[in-house]
Image (spheres, rainbow, N blue to C red):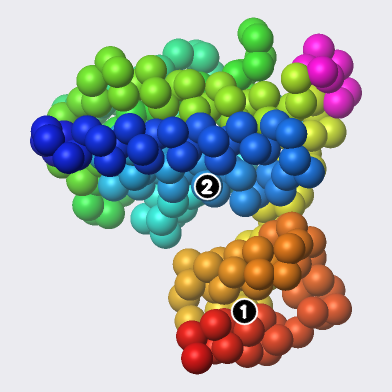
Amino acid sequence: MTDRANGGDTRRERDLIRAFVDLSHELVDDYDIVDMLTKLTANCAELLNVASAGLLLADSSGVLHLAASSSERAHDLELFQLQRDEGPCLDCFRGGKPIVVPELAAAEDQWPSFTHAARSAGFQSVHAVPMRIRTRVLGALGLFGDGVGRLDDEDLELAQALVHVASVAIINEKSAADLETVNTQLQRALDSRVVLEQAKGIVANAGEVNVRDAFVLLRHYARDHGRKLTDVAAEVVSRDLRSTTVLEHARARLS
């Protein structure tokens, strides 16, 4: 974990305020769930001094799906956990409690396949915190570090606080007790993520760029046109919006 002395503390406080301001806007605006969750993982990776973050979200049947990630490494590792049904994020979701693994090498007996995959991807530590509304666990946030060491209690509390605010933004405070509404909102988030993945693939293929860059291009197009990211992604998938239009917009931004 890096030294936050001197100007680092001031900058971190500023970034922390920005992160909560971003999430608070989601509570009052007509927000885009996928964009919000992606922003959450990016903010966590930046604020908590970890290399990457990924979020798993459960559907109405309690089956976990990848909802957002801050990097392709986290994206691939979260999917690996789901495919192998093994890993700290799954255990965090099932137990509803944070999991702290300061050194992955020491967790080989507990999660042999996950530990090997994580270390092969360059990660040496992992933390997971549950995403919940009241007593219902909605998912889990994974925080992956390139170095050995645990997050301090303050950072773990910060991660949990960010996830709590995001949980409320997803469900909507007024309807959190309505199980049908909760399930509908969760499914909408997961469906939107599937469409976004398809749109990223289309733009990546058309522009011969990687999927992470394709996501950035889609987000820029949506924001520059005052539109929801999920709406833009859906139009790319349905071919109502050509991928070349998104790419041309990106080139125009750079000129």
Q: 12 left or right of 77?
A: left
Query: Circle 2 sits on which residue?
Result: 39
Q: Residue at x 65, y 16 (%)?
A: 133
Q: Residue at x 41, y 26 (%)?
A: 159
Q: Position of residue 181 (x, y in %)?
A: 86, 26
Reading the chain from its start, which is encountered first: label 1 or label 2? 2
Q: CA distance from mark 1 to mark 2?
A: 20 Å
Which of the two residues, 67 or 168, is positioned nearer the viewer here? 168
Q: Which residues are magenta?
A: 174-181
Q: Amino acid at mark 1?
A: Val
Q: Residue at x 62, y 79 (%)?
A: 203
Q: Secondary structure at mark 1?
A: helix
Which of the two residues, 223 or 232, is positioned nearer the viewer here? 223
Which of the two residues, 102 or 13, is positioned nearer the viewer here? 13
Any magenta on residue 179? yes
Q: Residue at x 61, y 32 (%)?
A: 24
Q: Main secondary structure of the magenta part?
A: helix
Q: Position of residue 5 (x, y in %)?
A: 11, 33
Query: Circle 1 sits on which residue?
Result: 203
- Residues at marks 1 and 2 touching, judged by CB atoms closer than 8 Å: no
Q: Position of residue 85 (x, y in %)?
A: 49, 35
Which of the two residues, 18 or 76, is positioned nearer the viewer here? 18
Q: Residue furthest top?
A: 135
Q: Secondary structure at mark 2?
A: helix
